[in-house]
Image (tube, rainbow, N blue to C red):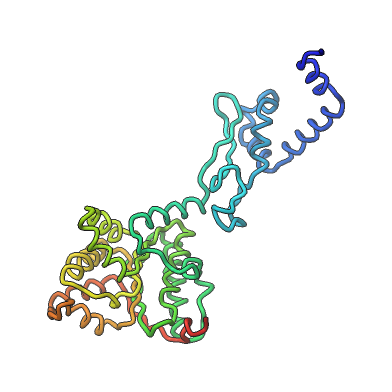
Amino acid sequence: MEPINNQLRKVMDSQTFQERYEQMKREILENKGVQQFLADNDQEVNKDMVDRGLVKLYEYTGQQHDCDACPSVVKCQNALKGFIPKLSIIRESIEVEYTPCQQKRMDDERRKAASMISSMHMPKDVLRATIKDLMIDDHSRVNIANRAADFVREFKETGELPQKGFYLYGEFGVGKSFVLGAIANELATLQIKSVVVFVPEFLREMKGSIQDQSLQEKIDFVKKAPVLMLDDLGAETLSSWTRDEILGTIFHYRMAEQLPTFITSNLGYDELEDHLAYNQKGDRDMLKASRIMERIKAVTTPIRMSGQNRRDQK
């Protein structure tokens, strides 16, 4: 029987194989990414290195390098989902390295946040929202869309986040939470992290966090967020402890550090102050409520939101 090495050698030496090999090599070397890599490293790369690295170059050309057309990490077509291939030279050999794509980094941040505060989960339409998607059916929505665009534009122009966010208040279902999602997603494209918290659920969770000793960690995570978004403030049942030790601590820190905070509520400033004055036992403390409101006013600008009820349209 003829040795297998001899058989392989015949295949390698055949004209058909050589033609396929040369065609594949031409296609690889005509790839724009490969050409750019070779041009950037023309002082180091030689013909022998290219021949030895052809498999790596082929691996590189067979994958996506731009995330713009990718809907999500789950649907990523690359060998490593959520990672972009990058050519490099390591010890005189061409290698392929993988770096997380923007979608992957954003997804990891969301997962990290969700693992710490379970109440952060928002409806899918809110999470997909953008400023361009805001329904403009009322003059107040025009104002909000313009103010949201101005907030993002100021960061783009100065590299600094504005010190104040918005206090959006109005009737049920007018899309206040949707605005938060739109701004958060716009900021995410600029690599600015936003933490979105559904307040009633968050405060319920804080009570249970005392036992598992994660209370301080969760408070710190929320209060130190680059951009904090508190959804449905005023819908919760307050105790003196959740008002003073949780909300009071968060707002005091953000005021002192001048960190932008966005809040949605069905209550205006005055109505919210009255809500904060009472605990679940019915005890009234206007002084503490006033102190918290001072801090809320220091980190937000009030904007009344009206328009059609989005929930009635579904």
Q: Is residue 280 left or right of residue 71?
A: left
Residue in front for this viewpoint, 141 or 108: 108
Count all numbered tags in the image, as a single digit.
0
Q: Nearer the viewer, residue 98 or 34?
A: 98
The residue depicted at 53 percent of the width and 49 percent of the height is 101
Q: Position of residue 110 (x, y in %)?
A: 42, 56
Identify the residue shown where x is 30% and y is 74%. 233
- Work out whether residue 294 or residue 235 is closer to the camera in this orientation and state it: 235
**Residue 174, image quadrant:** bottom left
Picture quadrant where residue 15 is located: top right
Q: Is residue 10 left or right of residue 283?
A: right
- Considering every residue shown, the one lying at the far right of the view is 15
Q: Point out residue 45 in the picture as x, y percentages from the top left corner.
A: 64, 28
The answer to whether 287 appears left or right of 136 in the picture is: left
At horizontal 55% and vertical 53% (from top left) the residue drawn is 74
| Percent position of residue 102, x then y | 51, 52
| Residue at horizontal 25 percent and vertical 59 percent from the top | 219
Which quarter of the rendering shows the N terminus? top right
Residue 272 vs 223, above or below: the answer is below
Q: Nearer the viewer, residue 160 or 112?
A: 112
Q: In which quarter of the view is residue 221 placed?
A: bottom left
